[in-house]
Amino acid sequence: MYNLVREIKKHIVIYALFLKNSLIAQMEYRFNFIGNMSMEVGYLFVKLSYVIVVYRSGVSINGLSPDEILLFIGTFVTLTAAYAGLFMLNNFRLRSKIRDGDLDLLLTKPVSLQFMATLRQADLTLFTVDAVAGLVMVAIAWGRLGIPVNLITVGGYGGFLIISTVVSYSLFLLPQILSFWLVNTSAIAEVTDSFWDFNNMPMDIYNRWIQQIGVFVLPIFVISNFPPMFVLHKMPSIYLAWSALIPLILLLAVRLLWKQGLKNYSSASS
Amino acid sequence: MRWLSKYTKAFELGFQTALEYRANFLLSLISAAYPIFIQTFMWTAIYQNSTESVVYGYTYRQMLAYTFLAGLVARIVRTGFEYEIMDDIKNGRFSTFLVKPQGYFPYRLCSFFGQKLPGLVMILGIMVIVLLSLTAFWGVAPQFYQVVAFLVTLALAVILNFLIFYCFSSVAFWIIEIGFLFEGIRIVTILLSGGIFPLEVFGTRFLQVMNLLPFQYTVSYPINVLNGKIDAAGIAQGMLVQCFWIAACWLLASVLWRWGSGRYVAVGG
């Protein structure tokens, strides 16, 4: 137990260093930093356009008022901060690391290889833009809906955000691990990345079949639907149970596939 | 006609490049299908829950037709050469065009058309299927003159969008690493051109501002020509405005490029 705590502590310290290094690297090319920010602001405008459509139409969509939909979209933008800022870059670079044999050096480090290969790079510009915008949207919706601010609502919402972050890490890493077997998975990366946008609107806009597939088969809807559903008291008990299970299932699947893939890895260096 | 042959070569090269990366193009089409899928469900839910049959000036059928066509038209007019221009300027390849008896603008234009051609054929094929489906299931068929006018406005829209991004790409003379900014500009121009939602969604004041800018003439206007929201007089007037913006952007591009070229520093061996 002591060893486990020590290992976790060590990884947290290293992760903080990764973030610091990423920030230093980004600040070195300042115009890149601004350009990156403007790109994310552009994407943010697109997400906000969905909010405008909903508010200006003034209709409740399948039982969800515009304020409730704002809470869903705000949650989606907040979680985009974690996905685009902390995971996406690593996911995209994993295949080149495997193909070019760049994992060789990482294999020798006394830290988890999966941790090093999948969490080392972060884009804190994307993270900051989306986190600030998303949390502002959530705060506005929260206030307009009169949701009480207490330990249960805020703690529960925060807990579901953590679950969603774990699910997004695992779900979007899974297809990238196929790079251990396939030479070029850029096609898979493109298609799966676009999948993220399915959370742009609440899953209630889709029919029952798509909702069930998106929750239980390909759990994309778990990511940005469960946190607002919890605070809006719209979460069926089966979803509550599933939210406890799905991060564990996905983490286990990622771990097993990673270990299996690693057996297939062959060094490419001289 | 020797002067023409070098540009037909540029066209051929662009065409070959597009064919080389055809799998990429097909995948980008799949990525383009996602927003159409999401918006189709979103509009269906909005119209089902609305007491009005017309929302933002569009009936349900018109809105779905707009959503499908916007996804396809935005893909047709989309550029991408701005990243190549950035590389040319950054890595010093632009120098070769200064000494060759070949203009950079016509070279880029021909190469762009060559790269567009295979995708254009494919997307127009998809568009024909969409239109035939609309006719078969909803009994909504555009008239012949609307189809012809649409094709003309679409061709003008492709040229206009090329010139808009040719203007934007001149910024690479001042800022070397500008790729991310291009992506930001690209996504905002898609939104402003009506490539995601009809511009009426954002209100009349927004529309008034957009009327003063060229963006809507790249996506929103050709679609509204096809779906019958603009009458014959409006179509002719719109084409004239498109021609005006093409001339204005061409003039602006000439000024910007002449100004930018003065700042160019050749780097590389």
Image (cartoon, rainbow, N blue to C red):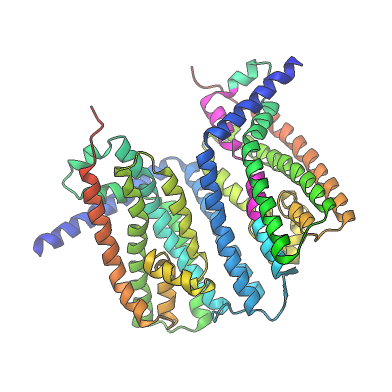
Residue plotted at (50% across, 79% down): A143
Q: Position of residue B103 (x, y in %)?
A: 69, 23
Q: Position of residue A228 (x, y in %)?
A: 44, 75
Residue plotted at (59% across, 64% down): B39
Q: Main secondary structure of the magenta part?
A: helix
Q: Position of residue A190 (x, y in %)?
A: 46, 48
Q: Say whether residue B82 is magenta.
A: yes
Q: Is residue B40 above or below residue B122?
A: below
Q: Quadrant of residue B52?
A: bottom right
Q: Which residues are magenta?
A: B70-94
Work out which quarter of the rendered image holds the N terminus of chain A and state it: bottom left
Say whether residue A269 is left or right of residue A54: left
Q: Is residue A35 above or below residue B82?
A: below
Q: Say whether residue B151 is magenta.
A: no
Q: Quadrant of residue B3?
A: top right
Say whether residue A223 is left or right of residue B137: left
Q: Position of residue A160 (x, y in %)?
A: 36, 72
Residue plotted at (39% across, 82% down): A236
